[in-house]
Amino acid sequence: MKYAMKLVSALSVAALASAQELDKPALTSNLDYLLEGNTDNLPSVGHSVASWEAGWIPQDCKDLGEGEDLAATDFEVYEVTYDDCADPWLVCRHKEAPNDISAIAETFGRVPVKIRDWVRQILVLPGANSAFATNGNLAFFGTTDENVDVVIHESGHNLDGFAAFGENISTGEAFLAAYDADTHVPDEYARSSQAENVAQNTVVAVYDSNVPGGFPGIQPDYEAILNQYSHIKEIAGDALLPGGTCDRHLENSESVPTGAGNTTMTSSRLFRKGLGRKPDVRLTGVYNNVVKVFTPFGTGKEAF
C-alpha cells in the first residue's frame, strides 16, 4: 500500500510536469538511428503463446479498449510465456490490429527481463502509429508493436513512475541535476516533458549498454546528454542487459466477461452464460515486492 501511494503521488507530479516543454535543445530530431543497433543486440527470448477462450478479458484491457471506442468482444487475449519467467504476460490484441500476436511477442522478448518485470498487460490496437503507458499497461497502435525502441520507451515510463530503481527519475533531484549539467536532450520528443525525456534517455541508456561502441560510437556529440543517460545506467545497473530471470512486480488486473450480456444475477448469485472457466490471472511464482496497482496515470498517446 505504501508503495502504491508513493506511485500515485509521483505520477501526479509527473502529470503536472508533462505539459511543460523543456528549454534545452534537441540533440537530434528523433532516435530512429538507434533502432537497428538495439534490435541487432537485444536477442529475443524464446517464448510460447496460448490463447484464452472467447468471453474473458483482463479488466484493464476492457477499460482501455472501450476508452478507445473499441468493443471488448473484438479482442483476442493471449498468454505469452518467456523462457526466463514461469508466469506469462497477458496480451490483448484487437482483431483489426495490423500485426498478429507474433510481432509483439517477439519484440517484447527483446526487452531485458528486469525491465519487462515492470510491465503489467499489453494492448495491441488498430490505428495510426502511437503508443502510451498507463496503470502499468502498455498500449501500441498500428505497427509500433514491432519497434523495440518504442517498447523500451513505454516501459521506461513504468520504471520512472513505479520508482523501479529506487526513485521517480523524472522528478528526482539526481536526474534533474544531470539534466541541468547537460546542454541538450536526446531528441525533439524528449523536449515534451521531463517524463518523456527520461523515457528517451532510457532508450539511449539501453543502446549504450548493449551495442558495441555504445552511444559515443554512433553519436559524436554524446557528451551533450552524457549525464542524463549515465544516471539512468547507474541506477539501473544490469537491468538494462539481457539475461537472468524474472522478478515480476505488477499484479495482473482481474479477468472479467467481455460483454455485459454474459452475466445475470439470480437469487443473489452470479451466473455466467455460455462462458468457460474464468481465467486465473494470479502470479504463481515467488517474487519480491509485488505491487497491486490502484490508480492509472495519464494516457496521452505518443506518435512515432
Image (cartoon, rainbow, N blue to C red):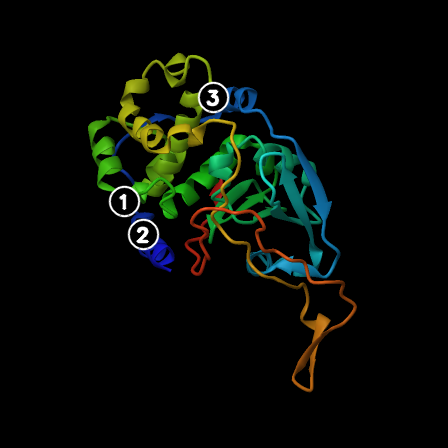
Between residue 101 and residue 32, name the one nearer to us.
101
Q: Of the residues tagged 2 and 3, which is closer to the observer?
A: 2
In the rendering, at what x and y percent does residue 74 appear?
Answer: 70, 56
Of all residues shown, which one is farthest toward the front? Answer: 286
Tell me the CA gap for discs 2 and 3.
32 Å
Query: Quick one: label 1 or label 3, which is nearer the N terminus?
Result: 3
Tell me the CA gap for discs 1 and 3.
28 Å
Query: Quick one: label 2 or label 1, which is nearer the N terminus?
Result: 2
**Which residue is located at x 58 percent, y 44 percent?**
141
Q: Rate crowding at label 2 as few (under 14), some (14 to 19) or many (20 or more) other CA atoms within 10 Å.
A: many
185 displayed left or right of 269: left
In the rendering, at what x and y percent does residue 22 appear?
Answer: 28, 38
Q: Rate crowding at label 1 as few (under 14), some (14 to 19) or many (20 or more) other CA atoms within 10 Å.
A: some
Tell me the kind of residue under disc 3.
Tyr
The residue identified by callout 1 is 171
Q: Are marks 2 and 1 in contact (CB under 8 Å)?
A: yes
Query: Quick one: label 2 or label 3, which is nearer the N terminus?
Result: 2
The residue identified by callout 2 is 10
Q: Are marks 2 and 3 in contact (CB under 8 Å)?
A: no
Relative to 166, say whether 271 is above or below: below
**Which residue is located at x 61 percent, y 55 percent?**
281
Q: Rate crowding at label 3 as few (under 14), some (14 to 19) or many (20 or more) other CA atoms within 10 Å.
A: few
Mark 2 residue element: helix
278 displayed left or right of 163: right
Tell me the CA gap for discs 2 and 1.
8 Å
Tell me the kind of residue under disc 2.
Ala
Mark 3 residue element: helix
Q: Of the residues tagged 1 and 3, which is closer to the observer?
A: 1
Numbered badge on residue 33? 3
